[in-house]
Amino acid sequence: MKPARLSVKLGVTITAMSAVLVLLMAAFALAAIWRQLDIQARDGLTDKMAQVQHSLAEGSASIADIVLHPHNLRDQIIGHDNLTLVIMDSANPRKRLLTLGDQESTELPIPDPGSPVLEFQEVRSAEGHETLMAYQLMRLKSGQPILVMLTLDRKSDYTLLSAYVKSTLIALPLILLLVGGCAWWLVHRGLKPLRALSQVAESVSARDLSQRMKVQGLPEELSDLAHAVNFMLHRLDSDVQQLAQFSDDLAHELRTPMNNLMGTAQVTLSRERAPQEYRQVLESCTEELERLSRMVSQMLFLASVSQPSAPLTFSDVALHEEAARVAELFAVTADEKALSIALRGEATVSGDKLMIQRAISNLLSNAIRHGTSGSTVTLELSATADEVTLAVANTGEDIESRHLPHLFERFYRVNPGHARQQGGTGLGLAIVRSIMSLHEGRVTVESEPGRLTTFGLVFPRLA
Ligand SMILES: Nc1ncnc2c1ncn2[C@@H]1O[C@H](COP(=O)(O)OP(=O)(O)OP(=O)(O)O)[C@@H](O)[C@H]1O
Ligand SMILES: [Mg+2]
């Protein structure tokens, strides 16, 4: 089943709650009105009874007086359509001495006549009306006891109450319609930004990640969401752009050596050649293929460093030992350029030994490649309160400052043609940066016009 729309769901829920609320309030009001009417009726009967008592005490000496001169008593109930006065002989309660008022013919239950205190009883009259009866035992001047009953027909009270219930029942659907409509409208309006969000989401694709949600004028809860979505789109956008840039660069990087290889092979095959020539061509092709294979393995390594498949387990690494080990590996290459390698300082960091070795060797190979013959390449360890730095410095052609921000990007070379000739893939520094970010550190570069170029591996200090 299709889930109901949020606006409809909320509208219906609020309507149901309002219905319960309105009905409860109406019931309370009904009870309060009824109580008030009851109090009024009893007060009215009490007053009237006191007047009757007064009039009997003043005017009627005996039962005969009551029967022969009832006008005093009639005055008491004149103008009160809903009042009936019945006087009975208390010795013979079945015998009515006098009946005055609206329900002269009404059969009333005969109460127990023993009490001189005013009592009330609710009875239903023969016509089916709810009636409140007050009765009291009184004595005439002669001392003769009589039973006085005063009944109030409450038809008008019931009419009032039923009018109230009727109007509530008529108003209820209208109120609910209004409440439900308003609730639906409010929710529908409140959800407008979400519809805008889904529109943005629909128009976003890998081709176009430039869409952003409007944050202005949004309520706080939704503006947080909009910010988060915009931030996510921004990150996706830059990731996708990077990916596109990377595949562009990759295709470009692979095309040149492949074209070279193909051209060389085709030219060589175009005619018969001496075995010596074939050998030379194969050697140069092998060199190019070696560079290509190095590039592929560098790329694979870079991918594994950027997105490690499993969390790395770090151990304590003595940086000076690793630097010495790498320097030893490069001793022959340095010798060929008449370069010496100097190592100063000691420090230990937490990290992955092989990765740290790789970072140092990438920097050292660059320093040797770009160092002037006869100079010294230095590896210097230093520490501050929170950081340990391994600086690799060489003298040689300085790097112009406009290149510095891009140096750690994949395939970026200061002098592409020259770097390629020297077998560089342009991935060495990108790998160094990824390794350092895995270690929560960073890599720095400074190149002075005095021709000292220094790269620094900065590690956070051991906790
Ligand atoms: N010590 C340095 N002195 C001068 N330029 C440098 C130095 N180190 C790096 N560079 C410049 O930075 C560029 C990028 O270096 P990177 O190590 O990433 O690539 P590469 O050395 O060309 O290739 P690979 O490291 O794969 O052999 C180099 O091409 C070079 O122009
Ligand atoms: Mg390099």
Image (cartoon, rainbow, N blue to C red):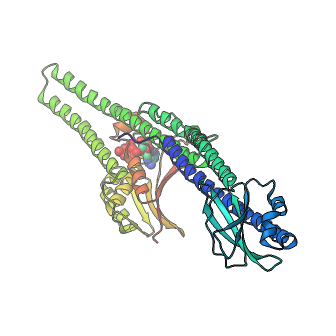
Judge by depth and name the residue closer to the eye, 162 or 272. Answer: 162
The answer to whether one can see residue 398 in this image is no
Can you give x and y, in whole percent of width and height, for residue 265 in the image?
Answer: 19, 26
Name, please, the residue furthest toward the top: 271
Can you give x and y, in whole percent of width and height, for residue 367 in the image?
Answer: 42, 51
Q: In which quarter of the image is ligand 1?
A: top left
Residue at the image position 24 percent from the left and 24 percent from the top = 263
Can you give x and y, in whole percent of width and height, for residue 411 in the image?
Answer: 39, 39
Left or right: residue 198 versus residue 425 is right
How many marks overall?
Answer: 0
Judge by depth and name the residue closer to the eye, 429 or 153. Answer: 153
Can you give x and y, in whole percent of width and height, for residue 392 in the image?
Answer: 45, 56
Judge by depth and name the residue closer to the eye, 342 or 156. Answer: 156
Q: In which quarter of the image is the N terminus?
A: top left
Above/below status of 254 relative to 139: above
Above/below status of 228 relative to 204: below
Residue at the image position 22 percent from the left and 34 percent from the top = 285
Above/below status of 163 relative to 144: above
Judge by depth and name the residue closer to the eye, 398 or 196. Answer: 196
The answer to whether one can see residue 266 in this image is yes
Name, please, the residue furthest toward the right: 58
Residue at the image position 47 percent from the left and 34 percent from the top = 209
